[in-house]
Amino acid sequence: MKPSLSRSIAIAGVAESDLGKVPGKTAIELQAQAAHVALRDAGLSLRDVDGVFAHTDDRFSALQLSEYLGIQPRHVDSTNVGGMSNLLHVSHAIAAIAAGICTVALVTYGSTQLSDGSRKGGAVAADSPAAPRGQFIAPYGHLSPIGYYAMVAQLHMHRYGTTLRDLAEVAVAARRWAQRNPKAYRREPTSIEEVMASPIIASPLRQRDCCLVTDGGGALLLVSAERARDLRSKPVYVLGTAESFSHHYTPFGTADWLDTGVAQTADAAFAMAGVTRNDIDVVQIYDHFTIGVIQSLEELGFCKRGEGGSFVADGALAPGGRFPINTSGGGLSYGHPGMFGIFLIIEAVRQLRGECEERQLPRTELALCHAPGLVFSCNTTMILGV
């Protein structure tokens, strides 16, 4: 994206819906709930929304949400590339607003995976036998995506000497942040020993190395920087954003599962934003599995390849640590309703606004959000600032 678009668009409103286990509400209802709260946060109304960027576990999400909300937008986008979809929607919304296609973009996500029981054992529904996953993965009982990340963890341990304790450090840090977040689903204390003693799901990943399965929805409102200055909440600007794409869901042709294109998106996002890694105050990383955080920290360039295990040691990521990340509690303890990307942005915006109360960091002017999509298929890195 052109550097000239840096700071041209602002996030004017953010919100999540009811979280955890929310029986009796559908994914579309959770999206609508979050959308109404985000509109109040921004000081806007449904009449202002003329662009809808929606993502659920279903198809045609933006049209479905628009009809449910009773609006007829000028532009819709239901692009689904897995967990990073809503970060991609932000990029698409920037382009649409800059091009005059829409003026107020509503970005949403919602899922009821916990209430539906639709993601047991970390596995997603098998594809048609005509699809690659249906032919080469599902018949052999491979848990997806957990099985892939288990192999990544095995490879990282073999290549760099990473330990189960290193993985557990990530989970414990997430829980310590969640204990400061009244909206988090899991807030009870945990320890490295408890994480390492939890049941094995896909070796070496244990239950506590894996994200939660919850219900929930989220929403963002994006407008031009000029318009944002007149709205209710403190604007947070998109300084830089970049994506990379390599394959469909199944990573048959991936040469090295510890080099997935993250560095490419990070370098491009930093170049667009005109800042460096040393300038970043808070980082939000998609933590579907503990190994994913360690791998992303290395690929994003916050530590050297192979040093992720030592980088996260001794509570470095937790409250009071030298490198705070996932200050909501992340997908490991705050909640994970199928896809977590939008919640990375929501937490980053709240940190930059100074709205996080007990978990608020002392200095937050720049935030980095990073999310992958599907299985090493794509990546996006976004830098936000005030």
Image (cartoon, rainbow, N blue to C red):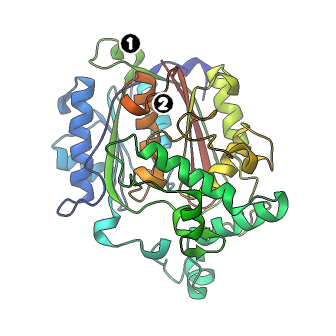
182 up-or-down from 47: above or below: below
Q: Residue at x 22, y 46 (%)?
A: 32
- Nearer-the-camera pick, 236 or 365: 365
Residue located beneath label 1 in the image: 226
Q: Is residue 261 visible?
A: yes
Where residue 24 sits, quadrant-wise, is bottom left
**Label 1 CA crowd tier, 10 Å (few <14, some 14–19, many 20+):** few
**Label 2 CA crowd tier, 10 Å (few <14, some 14–19, many 20+):** some
Q: Where residue 383 sits in the image (x, y, percent)?
A: 56, 29
User: Disc 1 on helix, strand or loop?
Assistant: helix
Q: Where residue 238 sits in the image (x, y, percent)?
A: 50, 25
Residue located beneath label 2 in the image: 95
The residue under label 2 is which amino acid type?
Ala
Farthest residue toward the bottom? 139
Q: Where residue 67 sits in the image (x, y, percent)?
A: 19, 49
Whether residue 221 sits left or right of residue 173 in the image: it is left
Tell me how far mark 1 sits from mark 2, CA to CA: 16 Å
Nearer the observer: mark 1 or 2; the answer is 1
Q: Where residue 90 sits in the image (x, y, percent)?
A: 46, 36
The residue under label 1 is which amino acid type?
Glu
Q: Quadrant of the N terminus?
A: top right
234 up-or-down from 184: above or below: above
Q: Earlier in the sequence, mark 1 or mark 2?
A: 2
Q: Residue at x 41, y 26 (%)?
A: 97
